[in-house]
Amino acid sequence: MSALRTWWLVAAAMAAGAVIAMTAGTLIGEIAYFGSYAAVCAAAWWAAARTTGTPGSRVDRRPWRLIALGQTLLLVGDATASAFWYISPETDPTGWIDAPWLGGYAAIGAAIMMMAQRRARGQLREALLDMLTLATAATLGMWRFIAAPALEKSDGQYTAGVLLEASFMVADVVIMSAVLLLVLSPGTRGVPTRLMIAAGAGRLVADIGRMMWTVMDLTPLVNGVILVANALMVIAVMHPGREELARPGRRTRTLHPTRILFLGLALLTAPAIAVAESSGSLGERLTLLAATVAASFFVLARFTAAVRQQERAERLLTYQASYDPLTGLANRRTLFDRLEDCAPGDALFYLDLDGFKAVNDTHGHEAGDALLVEIGRRLGSAVREDDLVVRLGGDEFALLCPQPHPGTEIAELAERLLRVVAEPVGYRGHELRVGTSVGIAVSHRGTSPGDLVRNADAAMYEAKRGGRGRWVLADPAPGGTGLALAG
């Protein structure tokens, strides 16, 4: 599904939501709602059955199936409630009729939690703590303004209606918490992630609106928002880049300002409610609230300053441990860290300079260092932005290229590397010339980082034995041991 098609689907969902909102309460509105929602559920099951990613990679469809199951259960709940309203409007089906809805919430929440867990992969603690803080504040606010009024109307009795109201509130918190956990986890935040965030926010807004029906008639708006939110969630699952939702992300050590803002708002929730309900005069309550906000701001500012100082020290240490001091390129440690996240189809290019020792012997080590710096710069200019250029040590370099085309793109890049390295390097009136031998290995399912490096290294030595100034691709078949001279 192309990017253009994605936005066409979003536009179609918005249009359907507008039609449903304008025709709510009529037969046409019911037909539009259930017809559109049935199409959304069918698309969800189609997306769950569809295979994405690189051929040969392990496909786990559980998150997508849970999304499809959750949407189907929500549709069943809506259809059952609508049927009861038409067939027996005087009957109160409260209780069992809510089971499909609550089951749908649980399935969707479990799916998004599963995505976040895989996305974080051992880095979930910080995101989990932030999510719990925000979820606690949201629960407190929803209880005060939604559940507590319902409890007051029932004279403090925990009736089935009050318990169900609380259950839906908990379900909303589960969905919101799952989306927050996904957002706060490390990883790519492309179109699928943004669609999932919008869907979670839409579900929360719609359900708050549903609970406020007793205050104002929000039925038309709520029905439209529900349809759009559900459609956005399914469009995210249909997107060709949906794997980013569950793909492990590289660890980030920077505390984003938005997280500080949300944590500050969460910390202010309980004091703000307590101040608003205190018995003092309006002026006293506003003064107390302003003092609470100011104190929280100063505490957060001091906390942020300490965190930023620690982040700067960590970044310096990380840079020194992860990058080559001469060329500024990533080093062997960084390469192996990235290889841990290597996916089937990623390619590793292993380069060893031909003739570098002669440059050192003739022109001295300063000339050799200048040559290495220039070669590193050229390699960085010859590859894509997402490719990783590494100096392994001495006169050895490596390139890690995510998902190149297995045929033409690998060959074109290998030939380009041979050309850029072979170009002379000017140094104090002299032309320094070296060549390179390139070994290439492609990752497959079950390939360990060590295996990938050994395969590329072996291919590089085969290129040297074949006459240097050429490249060799290791046997592309999984488990293969042969070498195929390619250029």
Image: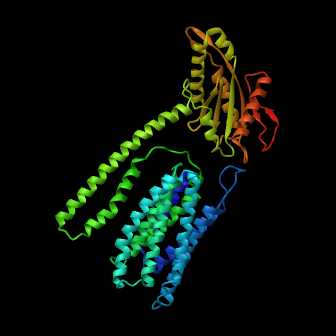
Q: Is residue 372 left or right of residue 475?
A: left
Residue 38 image offset from top left, x and y in percent: 57, 72
Which of 427 and 391 lies nearest the eye of the viewer? 391
Does residue 363 sit above or below 348 in this rendering?
A: above
Which of 225 and 254 lies nearest the eye of the viewer? 254
Does residue 92 sit above or below 132 in this rendering?
A: below
Which residue is depicted at the point 41% across and 67% down? 139
Instruction: State the count of labels.
Output: 0
Q: Among all residues in the image, which is located at the extreme right?
A: 482
Q: Is residue 330 left or right of residue 209?
A: right
Residue 20 seen in the current view = no
If the image is split into quadrants, where does the N terminus sit? Answer: bottom right
Residue 149 image offset from top left, x and y in percent: 34, 78
If the image is split into quadrants, where does the C terminus sit? Answer: top right
Which of 95 and 81 lies nearest the eye of the viewer? 95
Does residue 153 sit above or below 456 in this rendering?
A: below
Q: Please name the colour scheme applied to the rendered image.
A: rainbow
Residue 90 image offset from top left, x and y in percent: 45, 91
Which residue is depicted at the point 59% across and 9% down? 430
Residue 280 seen in the current view = yes
Which of 88 and 125 lies nearest the eye of the viewer? 125
Q: Is residue 67 left or right of residue 170?
A: right
Q: Is residue 208 left or right of residue 105?
A: left
Q: Quadrant of residue 467?
A: top right
Which residue is depicted at the point 42% across and 80% down? 162
Residue 480 image offset from top left, x and y in percent: 81, 41
